[in-house]
Image: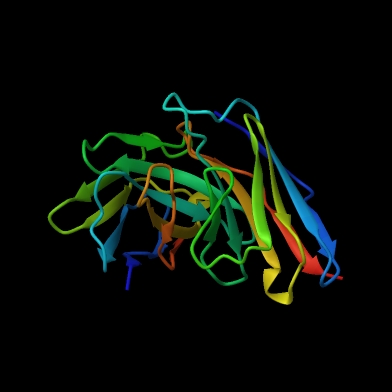
Amino acid sequence: DVVMTQSPLSLPVTLGQPASISCRSSQSLVHSDGNTYFNWFHQRPGQSPRRLIYKVSNRDSGVPDRFSGSGSGTDFTLKISRVEAEDVGVYYCMQATHWPLTFGGGTKVEIK
Amino acid sequence: EVQLVESGGGLVQPGRSLRLSCAASGFTIHGYAVHWVRQSPGKGLEWVSGIFWNNGNTGYVDSVRGRFTVSRDKAKNSLQLQMISPRPDDTAMYYCVAETSPGGMDVWGKGIMVTVSS
């Protein structure tokens, strides 16, 4: 199974400052069809997860452009250019290239 | 409105069976896969099972293989998860998740709580 390792576990941030979350996979996430099925999700307390980024760097509809995804192969990054109060919660990376699908352990973002 | 609505959860004794259902509304599930993802209280997300809508091929996480069975009803636009011999460590919020593109995991239900306890 593909192991997804996220860091940091916890990320205290100052409003208006940038933030970055890393995710590393134990094997390449490039599918045989040439796509990389790697997603980022955000979950607020008491809510279902919401997908933010799909296929590494594509923002979902309605996701602010302060969120960006990058990376390739086994190393991926989610960046928030200027953190806003609504960005708190837990962020998860996930790969859908190989079954079983696997999630990272999560990064809790909180305001300092 | 695009929605997935889970039902069938609740309290179940270890060893008894439980069947979760997920109904889609506002869109037709077709072409890609639909999944069950769970989250134990205070923990992270864990993919449990998935099924390819068109051909019915399925997959399971090791911890539930042989105990859980996923199925779909194309006519009813719905997904099921039969849980046989659940264990206390199966206690979790279970989310139904649909793909509208390959690997998408983009449509999530609100989740249904399953508690396995005597």
Is B26 on the left or on the right of B98, as rendered?
Answer: left
Q: Is residue B111 above or below residue B81?
A: below
Is B22 on the left or on the right of B118, as rendered?
Answer: left
Can you give x and y, in whole percent of width and height, for residue A35 in the image? Answer: 48, 33
Asked if one can make out residue B85 in the rendered structure from this viewpoint, the answer is: yes
Q: Residue at x 43, y 48 (%)?
A: B104
Asked if one can make out residue B117 in the rendered structure from this viewpoint, the answer is: no
Q: Is residue B95 above or below residue A7?
A: below
Is A99 on the left or on the right of B25, as rendered?
Answer: right
**How are the colours assigned in the image?**
rainbow
Quadrant of res A46: bottom right
Can you give x and y, in whole percent of width and height, for residue B42 in the image? Answer: 64, 61
Is A90 on the left or on the right of A11, as rendered?
Answer: left
Q: How many marks?
A: 0
Quadrant for the N terminus of chain B in the image: bottom left
Can you give x and y, in whole percent of width and height, for residue B61 in the image? Answer: 46, 37
Q: Is residue A76 above or below residue A111?
A: above
Q: Residue at x 44, y 56 (%)?
A: B106
Quadrant of res B76: bottom left
Q: Is residue A112 above or below residue B107?
A: below
Between B38 and A94, the one nearer to me in the picture: A94
Q: Residue at x 65, y 28 (%)?
A: A26
Between B96 and A33, the one nearer to me in the picture: A33
Between B96 and A25, the one nearer to me in the picture: A25
Outermost residue toward the left in this view: B75
Outermost residue toward the front in this view: A65
Can you give x and y, in whole percent of width and height, for residue B33 in the image? Answer: 33, 44
Quadrant of res B23: bottom left
